[in-house]
Each structure stands twice: as C-alpha cells, then as structure tokens.
Amino acid sequence: MLSTEQGPISLRRRNLIATALGAGLGAALSPATSEAAGPLLRGLGELKGDAEEELAYVLALECYVYGFPLVMMDATRAVMTATSKSEQYKAPINQFGRIRTYVDPDFKDCVRISVNSLWAFSFIDLDKEPFVYSQPDTQGRYIVMQALNMWTDDFASVGSRTTGTGAGDFLIAGPTWNGVAPNGIKQTFRSTTRYASVLVQIACHSPAEFAAINKLQDQLQLTPLSAWGKPYTPPSDVPIDTSVDTTATPYDQVRLMTGEMFFKHLAAALKDNAPYRDDTKTIDKLKRIGIEVGKDFDPSKIDPAVLRGINRAPAEVWYKLETGPYTAPTVNGWQGALNIGRFGTDYTTRAFIAWFGLGALTSDDAVYPTAFVDGDGNVLDGAAKYILHLEKDEIFPSESGVWSISPYRENFYVRNAINRYGITSAMPIKYNPDGSLDIHIQAQSPGADKETNWLPCPPSLPFNLSVRVYQPKTALKDGTFKIPPIRRVRSS
C-alpha cells in the first residue's frame, strides 16, 4: 500500500472502482482516491515496477470513463456513415438515414432504440460550413429533433415541445463559424464539436401508419448553408472509408478495444472534438499517461509499466457497466437520471448513458425510468411472471400522451413469439373498469384474455425494463410522481 500526506491509497483492483455514481455506472475512482493520487501521478515516470503500473491504472480508469462517450460516438459515426447512399440503417455523412419500420432484435447499431417512433438519423460535419435542418408540417403528430455534440450533450431540440409541429428551417453551426443566419431561419444552434448527431423521432402508433410517416421522413432535409435556397440534391455514390469495420457493431468495437487502442482512438477524436473548459483537470490526467489534445497517442513512447496499467482499465470499467451495482436513487425499484444530455462534469453518468442509452433526450423532452429489480428488490428474471399495475392517475403523466415500456437484455431486444418489443400508449390495450391498467410481463402467454396487455420478456434470463415518457409532466421530472413497483406473480 502506498500513502501520501493526504492518506492511504488502496491498490486492490475492485476497490479502485468503489463507488457507483449517476445513473448507475461504477465510478472509475472514489473521490478520495482520485485526489490522493494526484500528487503521486505528477511523478508517475519516476516510480518503478508495480507502483508505476498501479498508479497508471488508477489514472487510466478515470480517463477511460471520461473519454468513453466520445469514442462510442465516434465509432458509431464511422459505422453508420460507411455507406455510399442513404438507406434504412445507414447514410453518408451529412445525409439522413431513415428507419421506415419498427426495429427488431437484429438491429444492433444503436442501443435501446424505442418502439414509439420511426427514426431518421444523421451525422454532420460542421468543419466547413453550417447545415440547415428542415422539417415538414406533421399536422400535430408528435415529432422531436435532437442534436448532440460528440460528447453526447444535447444542444438543440426542435419539434412538438419547443417549436411546434409546423414546418421550419433551423441552422446548425459548428464551433468555428462566425457568420450570420440568413432570413427564413427560425433558430440557430451551435455545436461545440466538429461533428454532431441529428436524430428525429416521429410518433408511430401502428404499422398502418408507416406509409404516412415515411412521407414525412422523406421531407426531412439537411442542406449545406451555401446551397440553401437553391435546388439541392445530396450526393450519391459517396466514397466509403474502407478502413471502417462494418462487420461489428460500434458497441462491440469499443468493448473489444485494448487500453492502447481506446486511447489512440480518443486522441484522434479529440483533434476534431474539443473538450470543455471545465475538463482541464482530466485533460491534465490524460497528459500524465501520454495523451495530449491535438496530438496522436504513440504507445511506443510510453513506459511499459504505464502501458500495462492503461491496458487493464477497459475490462474494469466494462465489468462495472455490465454488473453494477447501480446505486442511483431508486424508488419502488425504478431508477433514472435527470441530467441526461446536460452532464457537465458528471463524467460517470455521461459514460453510463453512452453505454446504456446513447442518444437519449434531455428530461424536458423525455424521461427513461428503468427497473433492474422488482418491488421486493429481486433481479428481474425471465423465469418468473410479473405484473405492473397502474392506477388511472398513475399511467405515466405526460403532455404528449406518448409513452412505452420495453424489456431489454444487454441493451437490446430479445426475439419473442409475437414480435412485440414494447407496450405503448397507442396500442389497443385493455384498461380495467376503473381505468387502471395491468401489464403482464413474462416469457410465456398469460392467456388469451390477457395477451393484449402482454409484454414478453427473455425466457429464463435476467432482464430490465425501460419506460419512455415523452414531454413528461413536472411531477414525473421532480420526483413527485412515483411509478408503482413491479410485482412478482406468486404461484397459487
């Protein structure tokens, strides 16, 4: 055990990630460990052997958590733009891809995608000029466009809650643009990073609405500012970056990166996507393990002991992501985070959301209560049967009336016999005579008379449930409203 004037530093692996923070990610360092390590880390290169490796490991844990969202976003950008033309799940840079039907368990390019909406998505490059985002009049149908920078912070919201469902043109500019928006632009939004993600959700109540919503999707446009107001057709047969691995999902690509690979990717991404001013302490820690903003990371110039510490970090962070414990505030078994998309220096919540729900909306537009356990605190298990009973005044209060509840296993849907991956507000569900609602959560059918309200879950496997409530009412955001617990059905 090493010690400083500030106190002892434990170097046992599991104790290095001792605290669970934010929406559930185990902290890379407890605050006390991080601060105590600081003075020693400044002299990292002067230490020898195990001490040097262990301190590099401590530091790499914190830096991995910090950089995880940027690397995940950049890997997603690379995979989803590795195509020569716009298609269902991919689109070239600066163009919309359009998901024209509900997704199924085979879709794994994005984690925890919803069943309420049909989606359009794009990554845009704001290095040379801004882009104009144009949307049609949806005639009152719920729509939301969100724009995220590469750190997964939300910097724009257009649609039902903010600007309405009418047609409009909105400018999205990068960090270096100093121009003036032309007439006709309703609002200007600015990304702090060169690249940005634009996601559009349009509420879809049933497959019968696919055709109508597809027509709305086709009217979504991204136009370079220099071409706005002129006839413009997005380029076709765009060259594909052949260095991009399109055989593995972004999720798996990041998960399989060694520490050296991860930090090499992070250093490259930092060149185009600057950190925030408030990140200076972590940027200093990155320097101590050889990563400097604006420069490539060259492992050959790093001490072998430091590299060993760096390469141990990813497995530990992923272990905590995948196993918890998740100690965000829990009410009736439900957990949630209200700072999504506005993380500040809450790097652990930011990393957890990048792993658990990349692209989530801010709490003004949606909340995502999630349950890993039932009302008795036992892990949700597909071998059991559950009921979620909601009284009439407990049915997910929202201004939009749009909500859903979906089961996930390892952040993705699991195929079931009736191809149902959520219960939604738009489904013809059966309410009880008093207006209350029972949702049956189990792997096998609860019986023909209850199948309308049946939410299939993975058989004989742990799973979790996520609720989505769009335009939530204040009571759901401030904690006044509490979702009832999930109750296990006991055998009679």
Image (cartoon, rainbow, N blue to C red):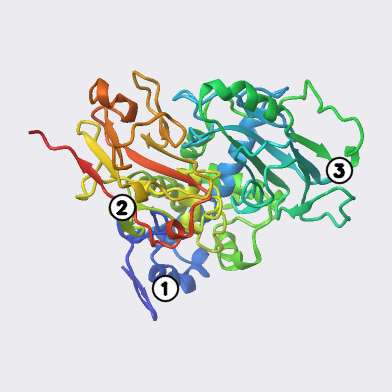
- Residue density around tag 1, few if under 14, some if 14–19, many if 20 or more, within 10 Å: some
Between marks 1 and 3, how big is the CA–CA gap? 50 Å
Between marks 1 and 2, how big is the CA–CA gap? 24 Å
Which tag, 1 or 3, sits closer to the chain's start? 1
- Identify the residue under disc 1: 36
Quadrant of the drawing holding the N terminus: bottom left
Residue projecting furthest to the top = 417
Q: Quadrant of residue 18?
A: bottom left
Q: Position of residue 129 (x, y in %)?
A: 84, 46
- Helix, strand or loop status at disc 2: loop
Task: Say whether marks 3 and 2 touch (CB < 8 Å).
Answer: no
- Identify the residue under disc 2: 325
- The answer to whether any part of residue 264 appears in the image is no
Between marks 3 and 2, how big is the CA–CA gap? 47 Å
Q: Quadrant of residue 117?
A: top right
- Identify the residue under disc 3: 225
The amino acid on which the numbered mark 3 sits, given as a three-letter code, is Leu
Q: Position of residue 449 (x, y in %)?
A: 26, 23
- The answer to whether any part of residue 37 appears in the image is yes
Between 421 and 55, the one lying in front of the other is 421
Task: Say whether marks 1 and 3 touch (CB < 8 Å).
Answer: no
